[in-house]
Image (cartoon, rainbow, N blue to C red):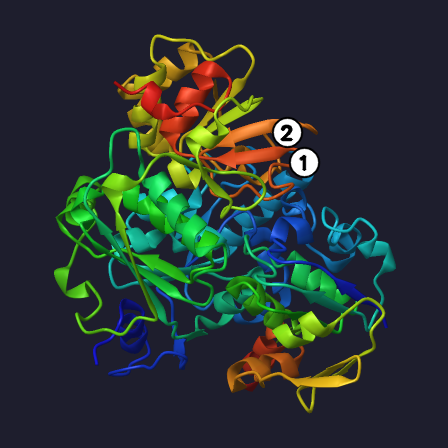
Amino acid sequence: MKVFKYGDDINTDMLFPGKYTYTCSTAEEIKPHLLEDLDADFASAVQAGDIIFAGNNFGCGSSREQPALGLKAVGVKAIVAKGFSRIFYRASTNQGLMLIECAEAVDAYKEGASVELNTTAGTITVAGKSYNFPKLPDEMMAIMDAGGLLKYTKKKLEER
Amino acid sequence: MGMTFAQKILAHKSGQDTVKVGQIVTIKPDYLLTHDNTAAIVGKIGDELDKYGVVRTDLNIIVLDHVIPAASEKNAAGHKKIRAFVKEHKIEHFFDIGEGICHQVVYEKGFARPGRIIVGSDSHTCSYGAVGTFSTGIDRTESAALILMGETWLKVPPTIKITLKGRLAKGVSAKDIILRIIGDISADGATYQAVEFHGDIHNLSMDDRFTIANMGIEMGAKIAVFPVDNTTKAFFDEYNIPFNADDVVWADADAEYIRELEYDLSTLEPVIAAPHTVDNVKPVNELEGIPLDQILLGTCTNGRLSDFEIAASIIKGKKIHPGTRMLILPASRHIMREAMKKGYIDALVEAGAVMLPPGCGPCLGAHQGAMAPGEKTLSTANRNFKGRMGCKDAETYLSSPATVAASALHGVITDPRKEII
C-alpha cells in the first residue's frame, strides 16, 4: 500500500482537468488523466489499496465527479483530509469512495510512516498512533454499503 | 428560536414544521438542471430508463451550453444522444445550443422562483439564490438517480449571515463585493454552510445579486441567498414570470447564525483574484501593469446586460490594445440581442473584440479561447484554478467587467476608476 500526500485546496481541475470533462466519462477514459496537473506520476503509480492524504478543502470547485469515479475505479481505499468540499464529498459517497475527515491523522503523517485503516472500528493508525473518525449518517452509509448510489437506486427500483 | 432560510425551506419541502441544523431530510426537488453532461448521466442508466422510464417529464431542465457548437465528433455525439433522450422520454424543458448558459436560462425562463428547490449537476447552480430559490450543485451520478427516483436527501446546513450596508463607490462592482468576501473568509470559509445576504439589498440590482450568488460555491457554500424585494418583483414582471408572494421564504428575525459578517460597501475598492485560487484576492492597484494576452468578458458570472453596458461605456470609440485580444460572451441569446439593440456589442466589436456564441466558452478550457503556456488572461468568470482555461502553465486573473474593460484598452491590468468619469 502506498500513501500519496498533497496540500490544501486541491481543486477539481487539478484532480481531473476541465478540458476532458465532455470527452472522458467512463472509468477507462478517466484513469490516465487522474491528478494530471497536480502529480503527473500519480496515474501510473497508483494501485488498488493506496490511500491519499490531503489538507483542507479537498475537491473544491466544479461538480465534476470524474475524480471520485476514477479514484474509486483504480482502487484508492480512502482519502483522508482535513476537510472536503461539499459536492466532492457527496460525489465520492455516491461512487462508494470512502472519505475520512481527520486533521490529526493528516498532521501526523510523515513520508514513510506506517498507515492502517480500520473502517469497521472507525480508526486510522498513523506511525503507531490511532485516531478515531465519526461514522457516516445512516443515509450515506446505506449508499456506501450498496457500493454506490447507482447500485442503491437500482435495488430500490427493483424492490418497488 | 426562529429558523434560517435554509431551515424554513427544507422543513416545508420535507413536510415538517421545523428542522434542526445537521438533520437529514428527504426532498423532491422542483427541478433538476443538467447540461452537456446529460449524455454521460443518461448513459449510466440506459437499462433502467428502458425499464422504468423517467420519474417526471417536467423534472429535467436540460440546456446545451458547455461546448457549443460541438467542438469535436465526440461532443457532437453527446449532443445527439441528449436530443434523442429528450425526444424519447418527452422531456418538457429542453434548450438546444444558442439559448444561453444554463444558469441564465433557468433564471430568464422563470424556473428559478422564490421557495423552490433546484439541484443541478453544475456547481454554479447556487446562482438562483438571487431570487430566493434554494439551489445547489450535485454530481452526475446523483442526477442519474434523480431522473429515476425524483427524490434525494439534504443535510440542513448552518448559516452565515452577511450584512451589506450602504452603496458601492463609482468603478466598484458586485464582483468586487463577492471577491472581497471570498478573500476574507477563504475558499472553504462557507463549506457545508448556507450564506444569507442581509442589509441594504435594495442598493443591488438583480444582475448584482446573480453575480454574488453565482460565486457562493467559491467559498464552499451550499447556497447563497438574497431576500425577495421590489427589485426581484420588477425582474419577474419584466420577464413575464408569474410571482406569488405566498411562495416567498425568508429567515426569521431571531434565526440563529454560526457567523455574522458586515461590510460597508462604500469602503470597498476594485479587486482581483490572482492565480491560482479564488481567495487570492488583492486590490487592483497592487497588480496594475501586469501584461495580459487575453481578456474575457462574459460567462454565467458577468455576462448580463449591465456587464456589457459598463464595458461598452468604457471601450466605445476606442481600440483594444494591440498587445492583447478580447473575447466577449453574452450569457444568453436574450442578452445578446438586447446588447445588440443597445449598441454595446457593436461598440465592443468595433474596438476589436471577438464575439463568441452564448455559452460557457473558454471558462472551462474545453474549447474557444484556450490558453498557451506562459499566457495570462483577465476574465470576469468565477474560477482561476491552475489548468482551468485549458493549460496548467497559463495564469487566469478574475475581476469585474469594469476592470476587464479598462485593462483591455491598455493591454495591462488597469484600475477601472481611471477610465470611469
Residue A113: percent from left, percent from top? 82, 73
Left or right of B213? Residue B164 is left
- Look at the numbered disc 2 and give the secondary structure of its residue: loop
The residue most toward the bottom is A121
Given the image, what chain letter belongs to the residue carrying mark 2?
Answer: B
Image quadrant of residue A80? bottom right
In the picture shown, does residue A16 fall above or below B55?
above
Using the rendered image, report if marks 1 and 2 lie on a common chain. yes
Residue A139: percent from left, percent from top? 52, 82
Question: As shown in the figure, which amino acid type bears the numbered disc 1?
Answer: Cys
Question: As shown in the figure, which amino acid type bears the numbered disc 2?
Answer: Met
The residue most toward the front is B286
Q: Residues within 10 Å of mark 2 (few under 14, many from 20)?
A: many
Closer to the camera in the image, B64 or B374: B374
Disc 2 target residue: B371
Q: Can residue B70 be seen in this view?
A: no
Given the image, what chain letter belongs to the residue carrying mark 1?
Answer: B
* Residues marked 1 and 2 touching at CB (< 8 Å): yes
Residue A109: percent from left, percent from top? 75, 71
Q: Which mark is residue B99?
A: none
In the picture shown, does residue B72 fall above or below B123?
above
Q: How crowded is mark 1: few (under 14 residues within 10 Å), some or many (20 or more)?
A: many
Disc 1 target residue: B391
- In percent of the image, x 14 and y 65: which residue is there? B246
